[in-house]
Amino acid sequence: MIRVVVADDQPLVRMGLRTLIETEDGVQFAGEAADGREALSLIQSTKPDVVFLDIRMPLMDGLEVLRRVSADPACAEVRIVMLTTFDLDEYVFEALRTGASGFLVKDSDPTDLLRAVHVVADGGSLLSPSVTRRVIDRFASGASARPVPHLDKLTEREREIMRHVASGASNDEIAARLVISPATVRTHVSRAMVKLGARDRAQLVVFAVQSGLT
């Protein structure tokens, strides 16, 4: 059973997500919060599998909640999906670097919202090509590459696959490009995540960009 928490200051958004979650088999609604402080307390007390967290909230914004959850060893298994009003949110990169597993626009199709729960709970990430491109563009516009610890431990194949991951390609797409099986891609991605200490695929993209692999 995947336990989900919803944190958003808009009652209609919370109600819509709660109703959607309660209709999905294998998914349990674990609570809701209307502000950042309430969200942090709820996440730390219930330790859900997935959190839908609004970036802009009263008392404590979503980025600060994300920072505190990511820094709490007791919440290491909690996966957070940031909710935004607009796809071009200026906090995208910072949230990914801090530990968000992906982004969803609040008016996303219900099917995408439910898919997000399963993908993120399974250790995946929600990074559309447009979001990935903005992460890369942020560095191209002036930010310099920074060293990523343990990057030298990666094999050449793992580095190659990281480049494809950072381009927004799925495992199946990478497998087709490199003429290998999707299972082999998953293995290389998992090994790269372990070696670099990446929380999930989203952070692997950030590490690839920061290290200049893209």
Image (cartoon, rainbow, N blue to C red):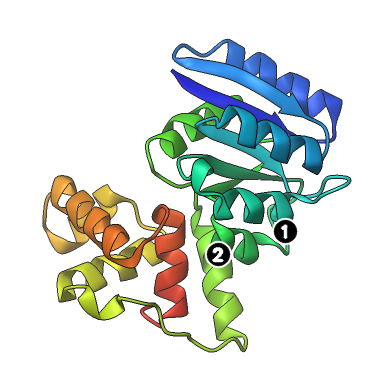
Say which of 139 and 95 sits in front. Answer: 95
Within-10-Å neighbours for mark 2: few <14, some 14–19, many 20+:
some
Farthest residue, direction left: 180
Tell me if residue 138 comes above or below residue 56 in the rendering: below
Say which of 122 and 172 sits in front. Answer: 122
- Residue matched to label 1: 89
Q: Which mark is residue 97?
A: 2
User: Where residue 71 sits: x, y (%)?
Assistant: 57, 55
User: Where residue 42 sits: x, y (%)?
Assistant: 69, 31
Say which of 191 and 176 sits in front. Answer: 191
Quadrant of the rendered image containing residue 203? bottom left
Tell me if residue 20 comes above or below residue 5 in the rendering: above
Mark before the other along the chain sequence, 2 or 1: 1
- Quadrant of the rendering where the N terminus is positioned: top left
- Quadrant of the rendering where the C terminus is positioned: bottom left
Q: Residue at x 54, y 56 (%)?
A: 99
Within-10-Å neighbours for mark 1: few <14, some 14–19, many 20+:
some
Say which of 184 and 88 sits in front. Answer: 184
Q: Residue at x 74, y 51 (%)?
A: 86
Contact (Cβ within 8 Å) of mark 2 with mark 1: no
* Type of amino acid under label 1: Asp
User: Where residue 189 sits: x, y (%)?
Assistant: 26, 57
* Type of amino acid under label 2: Arg
Q: CA distance from mark 2 to mark 1?
A: 14 Å
Tell me if residue 155 comes above or below residue 112 in the rendering: below
Q: Is residue 167 visible?
A: no
As drawn, is 146 to the left or to the right of 183?
A: right
Q: Residue at x 61, y 20 (%)?
A: 30
Q: Residue at x 39, y 60 (%)?
A: 198
Quadrant of the rendered image containing residue 139? bottom right
Tell me if residue 125 comes above or below residue 179 in the rendering: above
